[in-house]
Image (cartoon, grey):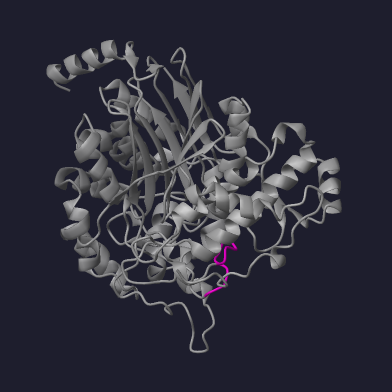
């Protein structure tokens, strides 16, 4: 690195101990779902990068070491805060449907949904957005070059990384699908078998792809030789990508949703994420209650009833705002929350069947997350995905690019559940160039004395997890308490309260059952939340990674 850049970093370090807005900044932090990605972010911040440089490095590193959660062949959302001008921005790098996609592409001649087509192989893959998102961050916010920020990921891909228990579990879940694709099996399996912990995964082709993206500033991925090789590989396997689909892909810059829960400011994800709308809607409902006065079972009951109603509206109204009119203002209003809350009983569950049926309105997971704050107060909350573990279980030959299966996030047929059990109406139907509805919910919470940067993977359960931990934060919880909080979930249909292993006590289960809730316990714990909390008074930072995962957080 040049002397001039080190000098610039030194100046930034001096500035960092001064006031920046209403927060004294002195500490930086990265929390991500994998230690190698966390330290890639730290490496870049220590080299003079800012939070946005670190976001590029962490996202790319996760694409290498968490192939079951994210990848260059996927997409994601970046919620940004620039401390210098105090603005928040939402970078939509979500995948979009190929131009040859049709509303009935996953239905057979009888009109029945064939799930295999939307989950495995080339037809399941939407056009990736993550590389374009990284280029956008680099061109508009970064201190360092794209090549410098991608260097840790390139090194990890070329030298390899050692798998852990989480990799073994995820690969075991998708081993049959991975075996169907020779290239993917050669990279991610051990001679066709699930790798045991300690197996080294080397991705030479992916290293070359990342080098190509860095040198061409992303142009090779979206229009050069790399793009042609990807398209040729996908089409030869029966896919419908065209080179024009890649050339026409653009990052969308959107305004984050902003609301208040009492005096806490909520800054979250706009459509095509459903997360911000559902989170705000649920919090608006719960604002009508003094939650601290209730026993734990009634507290859970009220949160479940808020979830039920928010997820019902998600299914009915939400989709890509470039294709359908999404009534965000109305759904996020306090008046709408008043109407929804009016049907909630403190003592009795509301059957989902008693709520208005989806479509009756008037016309009018696996994933990953990281949180970053730099010494100047810039913040990033980013949630990335290729959908279920290992995406479409297919790599484009010779590129190392593991394809997503985000096409399954569309509503292939009205009221037919996707792989997460979520139902949807016409607002989320398939159309060329359309972005599938997502549950990813990167979020900032700004209280009178603290700021939280948070998010989690988890498919349909993302919104409920963020809601639970947001309430924890509002009640004074630490990051460690937020990421460790016991999790429960309701998504309108099916009409069940899901809870993680040991997520409810025996008393809570009995009390909720008496209220009329149907309960279903998961055989495992779920989620992988990453949280950073900033003290607005002294600028100190605290961070935590979910103990359910293998991630790490650092503060320095």
Q: Nearer the viewer, residue 220 or 301?
A: 301
Q: Residue at x 40, y 35 (%)?
A: 37
Give the side of residue 356 with respect to residue 15, left or right: right
Q: Nearer the viewer, residue 164 or 198?
A: 164
Q: Which residues are magenta?
A: 414-423
Compared to 539, does 314 lie above or below?
Answer: below
Where residue 149 sits: x, y (%)? Answer: 26, 34
Q: Is residue 417 magenta?
A: yes
Would you identify the image quadrant in which residue 151 lies?
Answer: top left
Give the side of residue 315 with respect to residue 84, left or right: right
Compared to 489, does 323 lie above or below?
Answer: below
Where residue 432 sits: x, y (%)? Answer: 32, 71
Where residue 364 sits: x, y (%)? Answer: 45, 68
Q: Quadrant of the N terminus?
A: top left
Q: Quadrant of the C terminus?
A: top left
Q: Residue at x 86, y 41 (%)?
A: 507
Where residue 58 sits: x, y (%)? Answer: 36, 36
């Amino acid at each position: 690195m040049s002397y001039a850049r080190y000098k610039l970093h030194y100046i930034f370090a001096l500035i960092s101990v001064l006031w920046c807005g209403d927060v004294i900044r002195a500490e930086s932090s990265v929390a991500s779902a994998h230690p190698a990605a966390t330290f890639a972010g730290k490496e870049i911040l220590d080299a003079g990068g800012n939070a946005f440089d670190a976001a590029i490095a962490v996202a790319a590193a996760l694409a290498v070491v968490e192939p079951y959660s994210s990848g260059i062949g996927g997409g994601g959302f970046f919620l940004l805060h620039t401390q210098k001008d105090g603005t928040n921005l939402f970078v939509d790098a979500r995948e979009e449907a190929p131009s040859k996609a049709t509303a009935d592409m996953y239905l057979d001649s009888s009109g029945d949904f064939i799930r295999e087509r939307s989950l495995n192989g080339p037809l399941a893959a939407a056009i990736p957005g993550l590389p374009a998102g990284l280029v956008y961050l680099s061109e508009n916010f970064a201190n360092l070059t794209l090549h410098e920020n991608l260097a840790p990921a390139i090194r990890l891909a070329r030298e390899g990384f050692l798998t852990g228990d989480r990799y073994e579990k995820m690969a075991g879940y998708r081993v049959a699908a991975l075996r169907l694709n020779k290239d993917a099996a050669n990279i991610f399996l051990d001679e066709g078998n699930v790798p045991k912990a300690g197996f080294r995964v080397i991705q030479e082709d992916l290293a070359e792809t990342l080098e190509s993206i860095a040198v061409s500033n992303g142009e090779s991925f979206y229009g050069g030789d790399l793009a042609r090789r990807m398209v040729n590989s996908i089409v030869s396997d029966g896919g419908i990508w065209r080179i024009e689909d890649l050339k026409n892909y653009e990052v969308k810059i959107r305004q984050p949703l902003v609301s208040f829960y009492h005096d806490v400011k909520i800054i979250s994800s706009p459509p095509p994420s459903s997360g911000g709308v559902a989170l705000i809607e649920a919090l608006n409902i719960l604002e009508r209650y003094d939650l601290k006065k209730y026993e734990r079972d009634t507290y859970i009951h009220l949160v479940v009833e808020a979830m039920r109603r928010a997820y019902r509206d998600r299914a009915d109204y939400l989709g890509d705002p470039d294709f359908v009119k999404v009534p965000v203002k109305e759904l996020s209003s306090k008046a709408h929350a008043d109407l929804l809350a009016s049907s909630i009983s403190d003592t009795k569950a509301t059957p989902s069947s008693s709520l208005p049926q989806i479509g009756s309105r008037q016309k009018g997971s696996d994933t990953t997350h990281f949180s970053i704050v730099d010494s100047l107060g810039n913040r990033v909350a980013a949630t990335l995905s290729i959908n279920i573990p290992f995406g479409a279980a297919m790599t484009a030959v010779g590129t190392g690019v593991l394809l997503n299966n985000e096409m399954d996030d569309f509503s292939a047929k009205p009221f037919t559940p996707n792989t997460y059990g979520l139902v949807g109406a016409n607002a989320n139907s398939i159309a060329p160039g359309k972005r599938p509805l997502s549950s990813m919910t990167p979020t900032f919470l700004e209280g009178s004395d603290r700021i939280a940067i948070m998010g989690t993977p988890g498919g349909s359960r993302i919104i409920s997890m963020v809601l639970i931990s947001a309430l924890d934060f509002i009640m004074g919880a630490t990051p460690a308490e937020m990421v460790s909080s016991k999790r429960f979930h309701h998504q309108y249909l099916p009409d069940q309260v899901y809870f993680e292993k040991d997520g409810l006590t025996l008393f809570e289960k009995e009390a909720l059952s008496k209220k009329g809730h149907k309960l279903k316990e998961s055989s495992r714990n779920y989620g992988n939340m990453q949280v950073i909390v900033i003290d607005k008074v002294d600028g100190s930072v605290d961070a935590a990674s979910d103990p359910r995962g293998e991630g790490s957080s650092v503060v320095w």
